[in-house]
Amino acid sequence: MKFLLTILFLFSSVFSFANDSLLYKKRLQKIEQLHGWLSKRAYVKIDISKADPNAFDWKIYDTVINVFFDKRALDSVFSRISPNDIFLPSAKYEILKLSIAKFHELAQKQCFRELMFRQATPWLKDVELTKQDLVFLQNNLVQSFLIDGEEFKWTGFEFVDKGTRLLTMPIYLLSESENRKIQFFYNKLKPCK
């Protein structure tokens, strides 16, 4: 009986890993599709302080949201307002568009095959994670750059739980010195050939 339970446990562990690995690959394919779609469209730098939400250059990101994101889930997440929330749902959409624009600029500068992705990991090692934290980490992929042996998170992709539709794109903050270092690296990137 012990032997049967051990075999069953091993099989379920391997099956679970295979499902996670398959989901990871499908999520990467979704990001690659987004990258490909954006790379075929001209990027126009948008000054957020002067951004016109009705401008064509800004409207392209509405199309991205409608095609690549789970709009219903996104509406649900963005309409939730907590006591600590400082943004209205409409402002949250504009912030998401900025994240998309950041990835759009990257799509003009770097081939997808040259980008580095990994599953999100806890931000602090000694903090106990809640179930909500674990779900967040399991549903997030991070695109980062390796500069002088140090990893810098650049773009995040949050997916619906156990799915391949995008939910949002988390923003990663950098210190001033990190930002200088990554900008120097970023400005040297060359487009695909």
Image: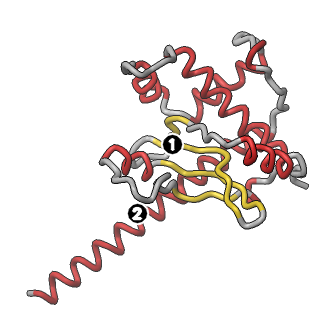
Q: CA distance from mark 2 to mark 1?
A: 18 Å
Q: Which kind of residue does numbered mark 2 sit on? A: Asn
Q: Give percent across and percent down for residue 139.
A: 45, 48
Which of these two is toward me, 187 or 163?
A: 187
Query: What's the residue at 44%, 20% (across, down)?
Result: 85
Horizontal arrangement in the rendering, residue 73 relative to residue 53 (left or right): left
> In which quadrant will I find the C terminus?
bottom right
Q: Which residue is mark 1?
A: 158
Q: How many marks?
A: 2
Query: What's the residue at 87%, 53% (across, down)?
Result: 192
Q: Give percent across and percent down for residue 105.
A: 79, 38
Residue 49, compared with residue 71, is above or below; it is above
SS under mark 2: helix
Horizontal arrangement in the rendering, residue 95 relative to residue 43 (left or right): left
SS under mark 1: strand
Res 63 quadrant in image: top right
Query: What's the residue at 57%, 37% (across, down)?
Result: 169
Which of these two is toward me, 120 or 182?
A: 182
Q: Which mark is residue 19?
A: 2
- Marked residue nearer the N-terminal end (2 or 1): 2
Residue 38, compared with residue 119, is above or below; it is above
